[in-house]
Image (cartoon, rainbow, N blue to C red):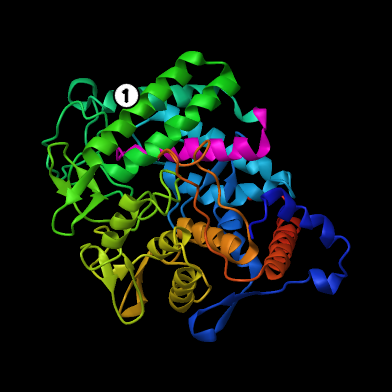
Amino acid sequence: MRWPAPFLCALAGWLALCPPDRAASQALVVPLTGKRVHDVEPQRLFHTLFNDFFLEDDATTYVQTGDIPAMWLRDSSAQTIPYVRFQTAFPILRGRFAGVIERNARNIATDAYANAFQADYHVWERKWEVDSLAWPVVLTWVYWRVTHDRTIFTQELHVALRKIVSTYACEQHHRHCSSYVYPYPVHTNDAYAEGTGMIWSAFRPSDDPVQYRFNIPQNALAVVALREIEPLAAIGYGDAELAANAHALATSVQTGIQENGRFYNAQRGVWMYAYETDGYGRNNLMDDANLPNLTTLPYIDWCSAFDPTYLNTRAFALSDANPFYFSGRYAQGLGSPHTPPNYVWPLGIIGRALTATSSNEVAEAITTLAETDGESGMFHESFYDDGYWRYTRGEFGWANALGAELLFRSLAGYSSTQFGPGGPVLALERRTSTPTLVPSFTQLENARKVVAALGRLLHVAGAMPRKP
């Protein structure tokens, strides 16, 4: 059974009726495969919220991506989304989350083609990635849908939304419109068809260069974001022109994906989605652990986890046919050209679990995560599948936050976060729910533990820390 976030967060009131020892720290008992269990302290699920979020002098919130002191548009938004549901119980969190929205609006106004920024708004990295402009919109929509807090509709956000739409429209016609220049030489096939309706990209969500110019998962997330800009523009600013432009652009990109990103794989005998295409029929058949990817199209509300073409694509992505799917002694899962061969990403394992349709698949993913995480229980960027003690990056903030999202859903019964207004982009498809691992009563008890842990952390931490 799924419990709405307001109901679960109302459990905070129950805590006041509990004796002190009952409100004390209690571990979440996580079911693993083989009839085993694993204890997780609930406060660990809020690690990124209390270690990667910083209050700035301009009242915005700076979010670094774990062990790298920079703020990615993508990572900062994705790290925030799992925690928005808790503002019902703890309104103090609204200021933190609204501060992320405002900071990224100012980041986008600084340079719409940059993907990461420093605390002083200077560009950290200028890699044009279609999804970098989409994630801040998704966060804004999720926050607005849950809070209806009109204070987010600032002039800076309005400018950012208009800049996002104009940038996407320009990159639909990159050759004739764009002045974007690479920060350094890259190896990419530069032949691509004009007029596909899709948005031209230079880099993937992994920050690696694309092989072909049209990355399908990035364009899918752009459609979701553009569908969100339409009501945000109308509700927040009464900007009918921006709403209409966003609607038309979303329709154009979506049509481009369906006509160019979907193809018949004769070798496998199925219809599926390409990871990248040039619009001429040449496709890059792979999937990457970084989101958005093909595996997590239901997570971003682009399609259902039961969509036939998606299921064919998922079967390819999570098999040896995908050159970046690795299987070793300790783990199997998605990797990336961004890291060495046979290095599996926890982020990819989590994404697979969030879009699974069976509790067994969720339990298998959580078991792998529990057996390969760091000494402190935090997730690495990636690790060697035949030796998890060999890894890249000691702490990856995005994976920590998304791992918390997985446990919020599978153990505490929280409903899936709604990215797309009205459900998935593909018509007549239902939103996907992550299977739960424990019965309803245990979900309620786990939700109580989660809310109690957050309350204690907020009480101890007091004000949000400032960036050193």
**Which secondary structure dominates the residues rendered in magenta?**
helix
Q: Residues within 10 Å of mark 1 (few under 14, many from 20)?
A: many
Q: Answer above or below: position of 296 versus 44.
A: above
Q: In the image, what residue occupies the spot 29% across and 78% down?
A: 328
Horizontally, residue 419 falls left or right of residue 293, namely right
Report the span colored magenta.
126-150
Front in this rendered view, residue 39 or 298: 298
Q: Is residue 135 magenta?
A: yes
Left or right: residue 207 versus residue 305 is: left
Residue 153 percent location from the top left of the image: 60, 26
Specify the quadrant of the image occupied by residue 131. Answer: top left
Classify mark 1: helix, strand or loop: helix
155 or 267: nearer the viewer: 267
Across and down, in percent, residue 22 comes to 82, 72
Q: Which residue is mark 1?
A: 169
Viewer can see residue 237 = yes
Give the number of marks.
Answer: 1
User: Which x, y percent locates residue 124?
Assistant: 37, 42
Q: Going 70% across and 56% down the picture, which residue do you hit?
A: 461
Near-viewer residue (341 or 271): 271
User: Which residue is at a point 57% across and 18% down the rendered structure image?
Assistant: 237
